[in-house]
Image (spheres, grey):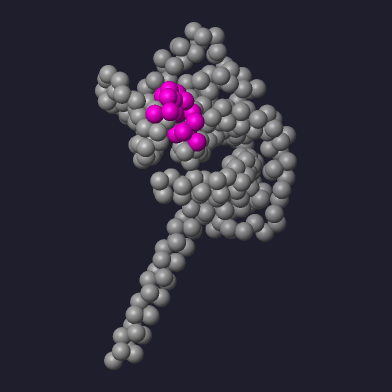
Amino acid sequence: MSTLTATRKTRMPRAGTAVRILVLLVAAALTLGPVLWTLSTSLRTPSESFNLPPQFLPLNPDFSSYVQVFQQVNMVLLVVNSALVTLLIAVGQMATAALAGYAFARLSFKGKNALFSVVLATMMVPVQVTIVPVFMLIRGMGLSDTLLALILPAIPTAFGTFLMRQYFLGLPNDFAEAASLDGASPWRTFRSVYAPLAVPGMAIVGILAFNFHWNEFFRPLILTISQENYTLPLGLVTLQGNLGTGSISVVLAGVILSMIPALVVFIFGQRTLREGLTAGASK
C-alpha cells in the first residue's frame, strides 16, 4: 500500500511538471512566433511573402533586403538619435523619480498626500491629450524639431515616482535616524545613505523607460519634422514607401535591425536587472 502511495506521489509532480513545461512552451511560441515570422519574411523575396499557403522557412534566403534598408534610410543616424534620446530620458527619469520618490516617502511637508495624489492622477491622462500644450511649450522655448523636444517633456515620470516611493518606504528607518544623529542633512542622508540602496529600484525605472521610449512613435511623429531628427520608429515607417508601395521584406528587415540594440542591452543588462530585482525583494 505504501509503495502504491509513493508511486502516485511521484507521478503527480511529474505530471505537474509536464503541464508547466507545456504552458511555458505555448507561451514561448506565442511570444517568439511573431518575431520568428518577421525574421523569416525579411529573408524572402517580396513575391514569396504573399504566397499561399505561406511557408514559414524561406526556400532561398535572400539577404538583399537588409542591404536595401541601409540604402533607403540612414540607419546609423536613426540608431544614434534613438539611443541618445532613450538614454537621456532613462537617466533623467531615474534621477527625478529617485528624488521625488524619496521626498514623498521620507520627508514631511504640508500637502504631501494631496500632491502625491495629483502626481498619480496624471497617469490617467493619455499623451494624446497633453501633446498640444506640450507642443506649444516646446515651440515657445525655441526647441521645435529638435531632439530636446523629445527628451525634456519625458523626463518627469509619475509611474517612476510611485515606484521609487514604494521602494524607499520599504527601506529601514534606522538609517535615517542614525544619519540625523550624526548631523546629516536630508540631502546628505539621501545622497549618502538611501540613494545607493535604491540603485536596484532606479535600474528598474531606467529599463522600463528604455523599453518604452526606444519604440515610441507618437511623440516623435508630432514633435519632429526634419529627417535628421527622426528616431528609429519614424525612419522605419519611411521604408513603406508612398501609399505603402515599399517592399514588405525591406520593412521587416528594418524591424529586425531595430531589435538588435535592444537585444544587446538586454543581454548585457539582464544580470544587473536580475540582481537588482533580487536585492529589492530581499529588503
Q: Of helix, strand and loop, which mostly describes the magenta segment?
A: helix
- Determine whether 66 is above or below 146 in the image: below
Please indicate, yes or no, whether residue 129 appears anywhere in the rendered image.
yes
Q: Camera-side residue: 55 or 133?
A: 133
Please tell me whether residue 257 is drawn above or below residue 137 in the rendered image.
below
Which residue is depicted at the point 38% across and 39% down? 171
- Residue drawn 43% across and 28% down? 182
Quadrant of the frame with the N terminus? bottom left
- Quick check: can you spot residue 256? no
Q: Residue at x 46, y 15 (%)?
A: 135
How many numbered circles are shown? 0
Q: Quadrant of residue 109?
A: top left
Residue 265 placement (x, y as % from top left):
60, 42
Bounds of the magenta segment: 181-196
Q: Residue at x 44, y 25 (%)?
A: 184
- Residue 32 in the image: x percent, y percent? 52, 54
Residue 260 included in the magenta stretch of the image: no
The answer to whether residue 182 is magenta is yes
Q: Is residue 84 left or right of residue 130?
A: right
Is residue 84 or residue 240 the one in the foreground?
A: 84
Between 78 and 62, the one lying in front of the other is 78
Quadrant position of residue 97:
top left
Q: Where on the picture, by quarter, is residue 256?
A: top right
Spot the residue most to the front: 182
Residue 211 is situated, as x and y percent measured from the top left of the image, at 51, 38
From this view, report whether residue 101 is shown above or below residue 278. Answer: above
